[in-house]
Amino acid sequence: MAEIVQLKMEKMVYGGDCLGRLPDGRAIFIPFVLPGEVIKAMITEDKKRYARGLPIEWIERSPDRISPRCIHFGECGGCQYQNLDYAKQLAAKEDILKDQFQRIAQIENPPIQTIIPSPEPWYYRNHVQFQLGQAGELGYIHADGEHLLIIEECHLPEEPINKLWPQLDLGEESGVYRLGIRHDSFGEMMLVMEGEDPTPPQFSEDIPVSAVYTPPEARLTVLAGEDHLVYTILDRHFQVSARSFFQVNTSLAETMVTYLLDHLPLTDESRLLELYAGVGLFSAFLAAKVGHLTAIESSGSACHDFITNLDDFDNIILYEADVEAVMPSLNMPIDLVIADPPRSGLAPAVHDALANMLPKQIAYISCDPATLARDVKKLIENGYHLNSVQPFDLFPQTAHIESVVMMSRQN
């Protein structure tokens, strides 16, 4: 039988949990609770140095607690902060970011700026992914990380997506295990169906959407409409194919681009290197401000879009390869580096290459404060100064924290 403990919760930590202490002093991490609350919790994971649990009873509730908007909050793994007013969510994320830099990067007073909020704290996602149940029902991963939660509502996707998904009926014979729905700047919609079978499922065009089927390691099949959508950022259009990544919060993507343009020392003689360049969202605005831009991206789909989106520039070189494979062989002077890596952060080979290349300035865009703090610590060891950390709340109601870090080489 699982052990039940009574706890007073202490502080929010990265990932969405709240930290408390067991009687033996070990940390225990509990989701969906707030600092100051006294709860009874069931221990679900008991390790030598820490434990995890789930709340089963509230003895004292925080005055900061509010009623969540969604009926699935507390079970769904998608949202962690619907029990907090939006202003308090933002404050919590700033505190968590500061804690990561203090503990991991060992910077006592990190230069963290006031977080930039999302203009819309609800219905802001232009892309959402559902997992499918055995009968084709749409759901998200349960908060336990193991089960599928069939859902009836979600308050994060843009309204057109929310109107569409309840109408979909893929059925138990479709062979689709994951369904993405995208909505672009022109009101166009796309269904991205993933399955193991190389043969695509039957698709009926009852609704005016594009639809593609994408099995692993096989060619994408267009079932209806187009194989891409078009997003507009600061009056510039971006083709984004079904397999390409694009920022899910369109309005804050614009804000991030503007922030980079305002804070990078760009001149018509600057030589800029962009790592993990994607479909060219940042490159398209930076290329016009610099003498030369070198971009590296491993996704073939994103590279195809990059070439289309930046066709009007002749001062760009694009490498389709892993960043760690290309960087050591780049034999050219670089003034500025922009990196937007996956959650895992920068590979050791990338750090080594940066230490040899010694650009004057580095802009690091991160969706993971832990790997960001780790990489910042390494960059400081290699001779860089941390100028600023600017968080952006691209993902309201969730524990995700996006940041842009500016670093400059010390003389």
Image: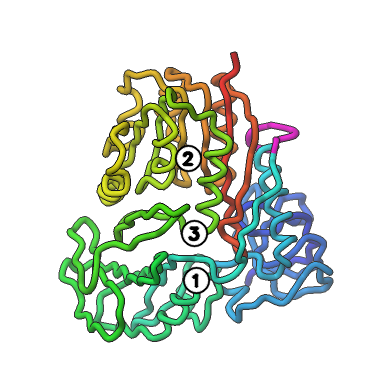
Stretch of the chain drawn in magenta: 103-111
Front residue of 8/355: it is 355
User: SS of the residue at dot 3?
Assistant: helix
Q: Earlier in the sequence, mark 3 or mark 2?
A: 3
Residue 175 image offset from top left, x and y in percent: 25, 75
* Colour option used: rainbow
Which numbered circle lies on residue 157?
A: 1
Label 1 environment density (alpha carbons within 10 Å; few <14, some 14–19, many ≥20): many
Label 2 environment density (alpha carbons within 10 Å; few <14, some 14–19, many ≥20): many
Magenta region's main secondary structure?
A: loop
Mark 1 or 3: the one toward you: 3
User: SS of the residue at dot 1?
Assistant: loop
Please indicate, yes or no, whether residue 3 appears anywhere in the rendered image: no
Q: Is residue 108 above or below residue 223?
A: above
Q: Earlier in the sequence, mark 1 or mark 3?
A: 1
Q: Are marks 3 and 2 in contact (CB under 8 Å)?
A: no
Residue 277 image offset from top left, x and y in percent: 38, 42
Q: Quadrant of the N terminus?
A: bottom right
Instruction: Name which residue type carries label 3.
Output: Thr
Q: Which quarter of the figure has residue 43?
A: bottom right
Q: Which quarter of the figure has residue 376?
A: top right
Q: What number of labels is visible?
A: 3
Residue 238 image offset from top left, x and y in percent: 36, 54
Residue 297 image offset from top left, x and y in percent: 33, 41
Residue at the (24%, 59%) spot, across then down: 216
Which numbered circle lies on residue 250?
A: 3
Instruction: Give the spatial CA distance, label 1 vs label 3.
Output: 12 Å
User: SS of the residue at dot 2?
Assistant: loop
